[in-house]
Image (cartoon, rainbow, N blue to C red):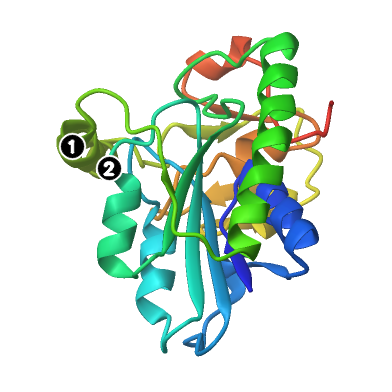
């Protein structure tokens, strides 16, 4: 079984690609509320890097896994560097193989998005690497292929702590008059923090900064402070 956490679709696509190539099944870990048995199975965890760290729900899910798998692997998607995130996940749940996979940036709250050329290049390269990763998973090869980057230990500790403490606020979220009251943001939110009030989304306090609400809104009605008004939106599309 391959479990994934995904906001705008990168990690979901990776998990589904690996499932198809290895004859496995990909499921959203957010909806797995009960401890998951792993005895004798191949277990995969696919997730995006958040500020050089492992997203909170992924850590919570990994702690619920019980039993001894035949083989376990983790794949993190990131803009370039993973820091020490995979080592952190390994300390929670033993993984035989770990990988980082470069994918398009989706963090519209923090920066402008990439060009179509850059997105195409990354997705094309990811497809090629996934063929290799899938073959290694099938062969149950122990592999460590993670681009940590410079000062990974520092970024995955101090910077990630700062992100979790200060950058996961929902206060900057607001909705414009482009909102059509479809409720997609509420249904997409893995933190279940969005409720619809008088036909408009209202954010609670809990937020994973997964970007699902702002990136997947069909009318681009959601903004985060002043910076996102001039930025595009990103959701995974197989452009190659």
The percent coordinates of residue 139 (x first, y second) are: 61, 63
Q: Picture coordinates of residue 197 (x, y %)?
A: 64, 55
Q: In the rendered view of the protein, which quadrant contains the C terminus? A: top right
Q: Are marks 2 and 1 in contact (CB under 8 Å)?
A: yes
Q: Which residue is mark 1?
A: 153
Secondary element under disc 2, as helix, strand or loop, is: loop
Query: Is residue 238 shown above or below 206?
Result: above
The x and y percentages for residue 45 are 52, 62
The answer to whether residue 9 is seen in the rendering is no
Q: Is residue 89 visible?
A: yes
Locate residue 1, reporting x and y percent. 63, 74
On the picture, is 230 further left or further right than 96? right
Quadrant in the picture for residue 152: top left
The residues bearing labels 2 and 1 have C-alpha atoms spaced at a distance of 6 Å
Question: In which quadrant of the rendered view does residue 237 lie?
Answer: top right
Secondary element at tag 1: helix
Numbered label attached to residue 91:
none
Depth order, front residue of 233/73: 73
Q: Which residue is mark 2?
A: 84
Q: Quadrant of residue 108?
A: top right
Q: Residues within 10 Å of mark 1 (few under 14, many from 20)?
A: some
């Amino acid at each position: 079984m391959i479990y994934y956490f995904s906001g705008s679709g990168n990690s979901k696509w990776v998990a589904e690609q690996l499932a198809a190539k290895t004859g496995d099944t990909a499921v959203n870990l957010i909806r797995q509320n009960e401890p998951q048995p792993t005895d004798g199975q191949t277990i995969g965890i696919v997730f995006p890097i958040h500020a050089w760290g492992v997203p909170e729900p992924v850590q919570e899910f990994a702690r619920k896994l019980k039993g001894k798998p035949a083989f376990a692997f983790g794949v993190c998607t990131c803009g370039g560097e993973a820091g020490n995130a995979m080592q952190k996940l390994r300390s929670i749940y033993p993984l035989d193989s770990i990988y980082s996979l470069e994918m398009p940036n989706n963090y519209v709250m923090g920066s402008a998005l990439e060009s179509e050329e850059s997105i195409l290049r990354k997705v094309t390269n990811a497809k090629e690497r996934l063929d290799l990763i899938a073959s290694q998973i099938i062969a149950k090869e122990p592999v460590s292929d993670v681009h940590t980057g410079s000062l990974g230990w520092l970024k995955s500790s101090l910077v990630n702590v700062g992100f979790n403490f200060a950058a996961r606020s929902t206060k900057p979220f607001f909705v414009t008059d482009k909102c059509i009251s479809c409720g997609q943001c509420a249904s997409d939110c893995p933190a279940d923090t969005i409720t619809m009030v008088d036909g408009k989304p209202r954010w609670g306090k809990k937020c994973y900064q997964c970007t699902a609400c702002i990136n997947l809104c069909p009318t681009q009605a959601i903004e985060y402070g002043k910076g996102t008004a001039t930025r595009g939106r990103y959701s995974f599309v197989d452009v190659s």
